[in-house]
Image (spheres, rainbow, N blue to C red):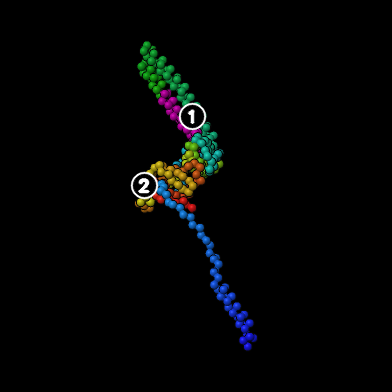
């Protein structure tokens, strides 16, 4: 019977040894291998920055309004976003009535000038006749006084003429400086009232970032420092003389470059470089 069961026993032993061999094989690694790069820190100048946030606003915004009222707006030549030059006509009133008043004032001035010339000639003759006794002193004095009166009337006519010319000039709305039109309320055909705002203009197109700086950092901020708002760099023009007691912040007024993508009314966060110090640095990568 041993000879009959020996092959079966050998087969079982072979299976057991094979199973033991599989359990003792090392397991394959499935984890990712990390690469570490070493770098020595070096001494370098490290910029010190103060964080700030605030609105972007016009450096100066000019209001262009009507000096006279009761006239129809005949022409509008500027719109929001237009770049305008100093003295450029932005809009015009119907000036037909004003020009008629001007012509009347010119005629009144010419009449007063002629009357003065005649009065002065009479006064000159009166002086000579008075000296010769051919004219009484009373009559001579009247003629001399008439010349003085005619001179006063000419001055009054000059004043009326100047006022008429000024009113005609008010019929045109002109840009007081170079700039960009930021708002327009003028529409052709409307009857304008005195004091009504027609346009608003960002003077010279200049914008500024009004950066609010925390009280603890504000003492380090001064004019001339560089400020960074995203990719835009500006320079601090001036700082407020005090701290707002409600927000405990001070304001730094930062001039922005003309090609800045920032626009008036935006809210921006940035930093002001207040100095530098020695520090240890390694490559950012």
Q: From this viewpoint, is residue 58 visible?
A: no
- From the viewer's side, name the closer residue of 118 and 69: 69
Residue at position x 59%, y 75% in the image: 18
Instruction: Give the quarter of the image for residue 235.
Output: top left
Q: Position of residue 60 (x, y in %)?
A: 45, 42
Q: Is residue 170 magenta?
A: yes
Q: Which residue is mark 2?
A: 220
Q: Is residue 115 magenta?
A: no
The magenta stretch is 150-174
Q: Position of residue 97 (x, y in %)?
A: 52, 34
Q: Which mark is residue 137?
A: none
Q: Residue furthest top?
A: 132
Residue at position x 60%, y 78% in the image: 14
Circle 2: element type = loop
Q: Which residue is mark 1?
A: 105
- From the viewer's side, name the closer residue of 52 and 95: 52
Packing grade of label 1 (10 A; few <14, some 14-19, many >=20) is: many
């Amino acid at each position: 019977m041993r000879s009959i069961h020996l092959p079966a026993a050998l087969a079982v032993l072979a299976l057991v040894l094979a199973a033991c061999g599989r359990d003792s094989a090392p397991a394959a690694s499935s984890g990712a291998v990390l690469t570490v790069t070493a770098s020595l820190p070096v001494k370098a100048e490290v910029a010190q920055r103060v964080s700030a946030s605030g609105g972007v606003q016009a450096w100066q915004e000019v209001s262009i309004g009507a000096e006279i009222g009761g006239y129809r707006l005949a022409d509008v030549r500027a719109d929001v976003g237009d770049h305008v030059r100093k003295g450029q006509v932005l809009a015009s009133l119907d000036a037909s009535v004003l020009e008629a008043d001007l012509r009347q004032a010119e005629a009144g001035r010419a009449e007063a000038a002629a009357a003065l010339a005649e009065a002065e000639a009479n006064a000159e003759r009166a002086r000579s006749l008075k000296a010769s006794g051919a004219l009484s002193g009373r009559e001579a004095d009247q003629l001399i006084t008439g010349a003085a009166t005619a001179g006063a009337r000419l001055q009054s006519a000059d004043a009326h003429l100047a006022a008429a010319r000024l009113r005609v000039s008010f019929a045109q709305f002109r840009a007081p400086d170079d700039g960009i039109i930021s708002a327009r309320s003028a529409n052709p055909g409307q009857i304008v009232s005195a004091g009504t705002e027609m346009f608003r203009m960002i003077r010279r197109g200049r914008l500024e970032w009004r950066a609010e700086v925390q009280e603890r950092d504000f003492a380090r901020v001064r004019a001339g420092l560089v400020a960074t708002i995203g990719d835009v760099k500006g320079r601090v023009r001036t700082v407020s003389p005090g701290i707002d007691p409600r927000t405990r912040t001070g304001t730094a007024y930062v001039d922005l470059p003309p090609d800045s993508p920032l626009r008036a009314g935006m809210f921006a966060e940035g930093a002001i470089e207040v100095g530098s110090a020695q520090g240890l640095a390694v490559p950012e990568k």
